[in-house]
Image (cartoon, rainbow, N blue to C red):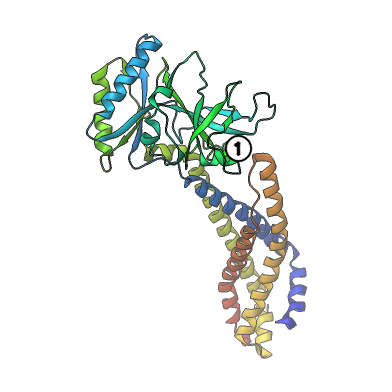
Amino acid sequence: MSLQIKPILAALRRHKAGTLLIALQIALTLAIVCNALFIIHDRLAHIGEASGVDEASVFVIHNQWGGDQSEQEIDAQVRADMAALRQLPSVRDAAPASGYPLQGGGWDNFITMTPDQVKPTTDSAVYGGDEHLIDSLGLQLVAGRNFRPDEVATMGDQQMVIPPVVIVTRALADRLFPDGSALGKSFYAMGATPSTIIGIVQTMHRQGTSTWDRPYAGQALIWPLRRADTRGLYYVVRAKPGELAEAMREAPRALYAQTRMRIIAGKDGIQDYARIRQRAYDRDRGMAILMGVICTVLLAITAAGIVGLTSFWVGQRRKQIGVRRALGARQRDILGYFLTENLLITGGGVLLGLVLAVGMNLWLIVRFASQPMPIAYLGVGVLLLVLLGQGAVLAPALKASRVPPVEATRSV
């Protein structure tokens, strides 16, 4: 093969335009494919993040009030609603909540360790609920205790209450107290009132799933707050195993039996976690599919370009190939010639593509706060393009290797 390099390079110099076009196409394809594969993997990993919720049994009711009611009347109605839901045969537990994991958007606060701290230590998603919220979501309490009923405060839509106790996720506890001493310690989430950590849950996803939320993944806190919001609130209901469908049918009827002055309607009125997760990650799923389509199209176009160019060169060189065959070149020699030629073109394109891939990833980091691409994706991209190039040139090269020696005696 080494004896063929010089004539191959000489032939490529005579076909500079075609060679450069294919090399540039390979380079651009490599740059896009490497970053696209990284984005696809990143989005799929994001979609698969654990919520901490018993998703097979939990559903959420968006309850809105009809008519004018005072905060005291709403709080009394919420208590009555909870009692009615918890008595249903198919329901294990239920709780009012200010929000729920994977909701989208939601309530979050910066966290500081002192009341006068200027730069926040971190950010946390904030949930409000009573002593039933942890069990209603199916969260795993790994340290400390749950709220007591007497610790649950009522908060209207025109006031802000900072409870003295709080339950946090393991991720937030480790961020605030890396030495593992979070239980019993205090921090500040708003104003000058500290909240003391009385319990730690293993996992609880934030409400949001956006790029902004990702640096604070898993950092959430629960305050013992029962909202008396005139605009409405969420009811988190956990069905008994295997009874989710029945509980979702019974729950609205039980609530309307309490009062008709409420609205539970539309596609967001009552949702199980299969739907909640699907909606939360629609954008990520769409991006992964789009990147997959782009990769497939680019690879197909690149392969077609290599096949077309090599077939054209074979047609132009039939007499040259015939001469080589007449001088004793075997079919495998001709096959090796074209495979080597294509490997050189692919190699040049790959080297340029690596530079473009790194540059594109740096641009994504700066422009869209993306993550640095691991070098493994470059290796996968290079291997993919080399195999694609050699596979694409194989058919034209086999055709060239079958050119008979008699072609050397034919006029051009």
Which SS class for mark 1?
helix
Q: Quadrant of residue 100?
A: top left
Residue at the image position 55 percent from the left and 49 percent from the top = 42
Q: Residue furthest left?
A: 89
Q: Residue at x 53, y 56 (%)?
A: 296
Please provide percent x and percent y for residue 29: 63, 56
Is any atom of residue 215 visible in this view?
no
Q: Does 100 sit above or below residue 314? A: above
Please state the horizontal and vertical placement of residue 279, each as a whole percent of the image.
Answer: 43, 37
| Residue at numbered disc 1 | 176
- Front-lying residue, 265 or 78: 78
Quadrant where the C terminus is found in the figure? bottom right
In this view, the residue in front, 206 or 308, is 206
- At 60% across and 39% down in the image, what residue appears? 177
Q: For this view, does 74 lie left or right of residue 402? A: left
For the N terminus, the image quarter is bottom right
Q: In the depicted view, which residue is nearer to us: 205 or 401?
A: 205
The correct choice, above or below, for 9 with respect to 256 in the image is: below
Q: Residues within 10 Å of mark 1 (few under 14, many from 20)?
A: many
State left or right for residue 96 relative to residue 1: left
Q: Residue at x 30, y 22 (%)?
A: 81
Q: Which residue type carries mark 1? A: Leu
Q: Tell which of 328 and 40 is nearer to you.
A: 40
Q: Quadrant of residue 154?
A: top left
